């Protein structure tokens, strides 16, 4: 069983807030994947269904953002699940609007909802972070996060939520890179085949290999047409 929890604040006052993009994502999954209607349990709104052969519980904690862990932790303990059986979807200030990233574990980055889930569930759960952009000035962060998405934001927000809902099976199966590719393509970008840090490691490794290869003499072919040509040019070399 898998819990997919979207984070946000309850009530119509907050429904359109950037901080509620996690709620919006699980709403999109619930509407697209044939889940049950929303009901109340575990201090949350929940919907049950099956995705990719896996039983899935969608959650929208109703405790307000700062206490999200109370709801998710209660459900985790009820079903005797481990942190690895939880996916949390939430807003990320430090990602450009429309960008998405997935990772397991890590810090809370100042996000109070994540801080609460860390405290109640442990840290080794999967996190789908959805970029809402940064206002550029620290003093404007609070108003930005608790402000509604602008009409212009729908150009990227709707395709983002659609891509998550349409490819929820990838999220359930743990096909994170494939899901990120689908999201990038839906927003008109290029497939994100690898993380930047992975590319850096591969570059560094290739430089080491190049240095090693340069230090080692290349072996000449011992048989075949090229070997015959080299023998004629340089003569046969005896041991």
Image (cartoon, grey):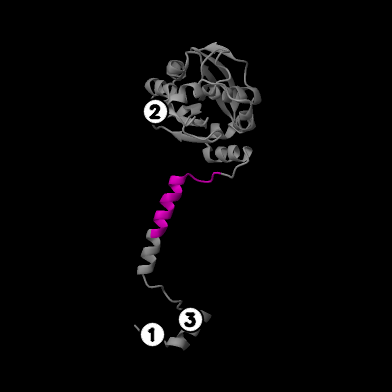
Eye-nearest disc, 2 or 1: 2
Mark 1: secondary structure: loop
Query: Where is residue 113 drawn, in percent x and y?
Result: 44, 21
Q: Confirm whether the magenta stretch covers residue 202.
A: yes
Label 3, residues with CA under 10 Å away: few <14, some 14-19, many ≥20: some
In front of the other: label 3 or label 2? 2
Q: Quadrant of residue 27?
A: top right
Q: Nearer the viewer, residue 184 or 175?
A: 184
Q: Secondary structure at mark 2?
A: loop
Q: Which residues are magenta?
A: 192-207
- Does 203 appear in magenta? yes
Q: Residues within 10 Å of mark 1 (few under 14, many from 20)?
A: few
Q: Which residue is mark 3?
A: 227
From mark 2 to mark 1, how far is it between C-alphas?
Answer: 64 Å
Which residue in the structure is indicated by mark 2? 123
Residue at 50%, 46% in the rendered image: 194
């Amino acid at each position: 069983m898998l819990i997919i929890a979207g984070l946000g604040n309850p009530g119509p006052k907050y429904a359109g807030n950037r901080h509620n993009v996690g709620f919006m994502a699980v709403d999109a999954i619930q509407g697209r994947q044939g889940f049950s209607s929303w009901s109340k349990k575990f201090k949350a709104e929940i919907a049950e269904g099956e995705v990719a052969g896996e039983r899935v519980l969608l959650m929208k904690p109703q405790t307000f953002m700062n206490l999200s862990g109370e709801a998710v932790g209660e459900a985790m303990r009820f079903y005797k699940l481990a942190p690895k059986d939880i996916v949390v979807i939430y807003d990320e200030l430090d990602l450009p609007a429309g960008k998405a990233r997935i990772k397991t574990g890590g810090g809370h980055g100042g996000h109070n909802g994540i801080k609460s889930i860390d405290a109640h569930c442990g840290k080794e759960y999967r996190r789908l972070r959805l970029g809402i952009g940064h206002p550029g000035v620290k003093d404007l962060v609070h108003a930005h996060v608790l402000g509604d998405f602008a009409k212009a934001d729908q150009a990227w927000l709707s395709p983002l939520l659609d891509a998550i809902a349409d490819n929820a099976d990838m999220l359930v199966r743990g096909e994170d890179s494939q899901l990120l590719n689908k999201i990038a393509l839906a927003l008109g970008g290029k497939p994100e085949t690898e993380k930047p840090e992975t590319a850096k490691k591969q570059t560094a490794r290739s430089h080491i290999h190049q240095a090693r290869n340069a230090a080692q003499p290349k072996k000449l072919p011992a048989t075949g047409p090229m070997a015959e040509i080299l023998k004629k040019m340089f003569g046969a070399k005896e041991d």
